[in-house]
Amino acid sequence: MTEMTIAQDTPVLVAIDIAKARHEVLIAVPDKKRRRRLTVLNSLADFNRLVTALKEYGRPVRVAFEATGNYHRVLAYHLATAGFEVKLVSSVALARTREALNNSWDKNDPKDAQVILHMMEIGNEQFYHDPLVQGTNDIQELSKTHDIVSKSKTELWHRVLTHYLPLYFPEADRFHRSSRSDWFFAFLERYPSPHIITAMGKDAFTTDAWDVVGRKVAKERLPGDIYETAKSSVGLPAAPDSDAISMFRLVLGEGRSLIAQRNQIEARAVALLKDLPDYQLLTSIPGIGPINALTILAEAGDLRRFGHHRQFLKFCGMDLATIQSGTFRGQTKLSKYGNARLRRTLWMAGQVAILQRTNSFRDKFERYIAKDRQNTHLRRKAYTAIAAKMARTVHGIIKHGEPYRPFFEG
């Protein structure tokens, strides 16, 4: 009776090689040597056919696959909502295992499904966190869209700095202070060439530009300073109605649109997360604002699933690794086999934290570089140590449910 119960509880193993249009499925049923192969198209009818076939076994089902772009997300959601246990396999581990099993780098979809099944049999799997099932899909989409918009805005600003301003108003660059402000794009859109400014006269320009400049310190001096700069500008005298100026204004309009989109996403993120306890805990840490907190919650999900901070560090790719063979021992450095967006966010949060006056991050940084403050290699190691400390702090406050306390570890 006991043997029968154990056999009945043994799960059916399902290995899936994900592709854009079709997925190769390999099914291993306990007590059956022959493995079943299926080809599942990326369609609802085939998904339902697969779910029905797996339920007919009358056993628990464990499914594993390699994450492939976003193509695995839909199939994984249908399998998870059907009640099956869904797992991931590491892309790096899959490649190394395939080479070891086949003594070759040769790769094809059916062979990959066989390797995934082998990794399931030896227990080499990872937890799969489905954003829609776990309720983090909205947060993740906000975070990723904000990242896309920010990169697009930065790329556009570089085009303005390296192409348009050197041609038409090289001296205007010194009036720009922050990439988050819209006023400079609005000003250039109104006055793309210094010759447009000087043609107006100083008083007329000051009156016309007053509302464009916005709220600035010493605002009454700024239009006059811009006018005097425009008088001695070396910019090309392009006509205001020329196609060249029209293209410049088109790019500036796109930049203003991206700034508005970014601000809208940030406002929505704050409105969505402000009452979330984890968000409030994260924003209590120096260097972590709304967007950094949004990215951490979107990419890491529930940090309580990491039993120890070392697991979270490894998830971020911030665990230490050393290449060693025989008497050779390489330099110990970050493995970087982890979530790159999380790693970048923690690094940026650490950079902000050490610029603030009093917190344990700045104290650690100062102690780290005290031996030689001009040593760039030592400073780089200090930045890495601060990012790792940021990761440990993030995991600690979420796990214990207490806000950040400066110098608590002391």
Image (cartoon, grey):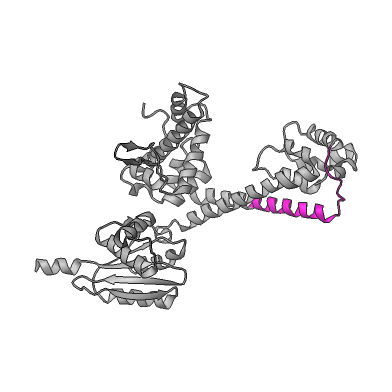
Q: Nearer the viewer, residue 146 or 329?
A: 329
Determine the residue positioned at 29% across, 61% down. Answer: 101
Residue 83 position in % (x across, y down): 32, 67
Determine the residue positioned at 41% across, 45% down. Answer: 317
Residue range in magenta is 233-260
**Where, quadrant-wise, is the N terminus in this rendering?**
bottom left
Determine the residue positioned at 59% across, 50% down. Answer: 151
Residue 199 position in % (x across, y down): 90, 43
Give the mark count: 0
Left or right: 108 with respect to 274? left
Instruction: Please determine whether, in this image, residue 38 is positioned above or below residue 287.
Output: below
Query: Mostly what secondary structure, the magenta segment?
Result: helix
Q: Nearer the viewer, residue 325 or 128?
A: 325
Residue 299 position in % (x across, y down): 45, 51
Left or right: 379 with respect to 238? left
Left or right: 155 with respect to 408? right
Residue furthest left as drawn: 1
Residue 307 seen in this snapshot: yes
Q: Nearer the viewer, residue 329 or 404?
A: 329
Quadrant location of residue 321?
top left
Quadrant location of residue 231?
top right
Left or right: 352 with respect to 78? right
> Is residue 243 on the magenta stretch?
yes
Quadrant location of residue 363?
top left
Determine the residue positioned at 18% across, 69% down. Answer: 8
**Where, quadrant-wise, is the C terminus in this rendering?**
top left
Residue 83 seen in this snapshot: no
Residue furthest top as drawn: 371
> Is residue 324 on the magenta stretch?
no
Residue 174 position in % (x across, y down): 73, 35
